[in-house]
Image (cartoon, rainbow, N blue to C red):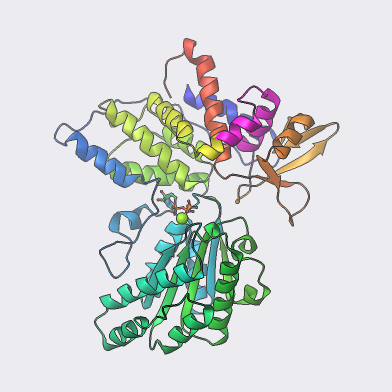
Amino acid sequence: MLVRLLRDLFQRRALLPSVRAEQPVPDVTVHEGKVDQHRKPNDQRQRLANAFTPTRPLAHSQTDSSRRLSGKDQASFIGREIERESIIRALTEDRSHVAIFGDRGRGKTSLANHAVAQRELADFIVARYVCSATSNFDTIMRGLLRDLAVSLAHGSSAVSGNNGRILESMPPNALRPNDVLNLCSRLRDVRILLMVDEFDRVTDKDTRTAVADTIKHLSDRAFSILFMIIGASGSPEALLGRHLSIQRCVTRVALPLLTQAQVEHLVERGAAQAGLEFSAAARTCIAELARGVPYMAQLLSLRAGQAALGNGRVTILGGDLLAAIEAAAIEADPRILILYARVTDAERDTAALAALRAAAAGPQDGLGRFRVVPDGPSIRVAGLQVEPAAWHRVLSLGAIEAVHDEGPDLFTFTEAMLPHLVLLRALLARQAAAEPASPRGL
Ligand SMILES: Nc1ncnc2c1ncn2[C@@H]1O[C@H](COP(=O)(O)OP(=O)(O)OP(=O)(O)O)[C@@H](O)[C@H]1O
Ligand SMILES: [Mg+2]
C-alpha cells in the first residue's frame, strides 16, 4: 500500500524527459521475523540506537587519541570519496585551509570527522570547536587552543610538552588575530588542524572578519596551522563572508546529496548492524522520502525499527514505516512546521500545497535544486504544472527561493528539511484517504 502511494507521489517524474528512470519498487512478501528470544529487548533497542543515529554525526572515538572513527561509525560511513580526497589533498599537498558547506543534515560534521580519521592526516594534531550564536573570536580561539592543549597532552614527546606549555601563556585579554598568530608562531614541529563547526551560527560580522584575517595571515606566513571551517550554508561566501583576501587560500568542499543507491545502502548497513530486516521495498520507501539527506534516512530507519521492535518483530512492515513517517512529521523542527502551516494555510490552500509537492517530489540536482520554467499561461515547477498565483504565494511566504548567480530558473527550498515535511504530510494525507479500504501493508 505505502509503496503504491509513494509511487503515486513520485510517478509523474517519469513523464518528464529530464527525469532519471524511476527505480521499480518491487512487491514484497514479508516474513514476520520475530525478536530473538535469547537477546534481551533492551539490547536489541540499544543495537538499533547505535546503528541509526540521526541526532549525532558519525564521530571520532572520544577515548581514542588517534582520532579513528569508532569502529561502528567507520563501517557506517557511506560514499563521499571525492570530498574526502579533496580535503586530504588540500591539507597535505596544497597546504590550504578548507571550508565544508552544505544544507543541514547532509553530513558535513561526519565527513570532517571521517576525513581527519584517515591515515594521510594522522600526523595532524586536531582541535575542535562548535560555535553557538553567541560565539565570538575570543571564545572560538580560546576553545580551539584549549582543545589543542588537551590533544597535545595526549602526546608524550618533548615536542608535545613544549608546545603545550606555549599554549598555557595565552593572554588574559580578549584574543585578537595577532595574539593567535603570535602564539602559533611559537609552536614548533607540529601540523595543526583547527576545526570550527557550525560557523554559520556566528552572527557577529567582526568575528567572521577576524577569522578570515587569521586565515589569511596564517597562509601568508606559511605556518603549518590550517583551519577547517564547517557550516550549513548554500555557498562558501555565505559561510565565510566575501573576504576576497582568503579566496585563494581556502579549498571549498560543497556537500552534495547522497544518491538514492547510497541511501539504500545506508539503510541496509544500519539494518545489518541492528539485526533488523528492511526489505528492498522498505529501503526504497525510505530512500525516496530521504531525498539524499542522510539525517532523514537515519531518522526514518530508527523510528521504523523502534516500531517493529515495539511489536516484537525484527522485520519492518508497512505499519512500522507509517509509524516512522508519522513520528518524523511530528518531530520536524518547529520553525519548519510553522513555515509549512503558514505557506499552506494549515493545508487549506490546496494550490500552494500542490506547488510545494511538485517541488518536493520532482527531479532535483545533486544540491537539491530544481527548475521552474514558464509554460504558456501556466508554470512548470520541477516538471509539473502549477498555478502561477499559488507559486507566487509560495515564494512570497518564504518557502522557496531563487538560486542567484546560476541562471534565472533554478530554485531551492529555503529550509533543507521542508521538502521532507511536505512529502511526509502528503503521504500521510493519501494514506488517511485510502485507509478505510486498505490495511497498513507495504
Ligand atoms: N556519509 C554518511 N554515511 C552515513 N551516514 C551519514 C553520512 N553522513 C551523515 N550521516 C548521518 O546523517 C546524520 C547527519 O549527519 P551530520 O550531523 O554529520 O550532518 P551535518 O551536515 O553536520 O548536520 P548539521 O548541518 O545539522 O550540523 C547523522 O545521523 C549522521 O550519522
Ligand atoms: Mg554538523
- The segment highlighted magenta reads 338-364
Residue found 40% across the figure and 47% down from its top: 55
Q: Is residue 49 left or right of residue 198?
A: left
- Residue 439: give x, y in percent of width and height: 42, 15
Q: How many marks?
A: 0
Residue found 59% across the figure and 44% down from its top: 415
Which residue reaches farthest right? 376
Near-viewer residue (266 or 386): 386
Residue found 34% across the figure and 81% down from its top: 168
Q: Is residue 9 left or right of residue 326?
A: right
Query: Is 375 rendered above or below residue 218?
Result: above
Magenta includes 251?
no
Near-viewer residue (393 or 39): 393
Magenta includes 340?
yes
Residue 337 image-quadrant placement: top right
Query: Is 266 rendered above or below residue 95?
Result: above
- Residue 368: give x, y in percent of width and height: 61, 47
Please say whether residue 315 is visible from this viewpoint: no
Query: Is 252 rendered above or below residue 311?
Result: below
- Residue 232: give x, y in percent of width and height: 54, 55
Query: Is 338 rendered above or below residue 85?
Result: above
Tell me the chief SS of the magenta region.
helix
Please say whether residue 416 is visible from this viewpoint: yes
Near-viewer residue (423 or 340): 340
Residue 156 image-quadrant placement: bottom left
- Residue 138: give x, y in percent of width and height: 47, 71
Q: Which corner quadrant holds the C terminus?
A: top left
Which residue reaches farthest top? 437
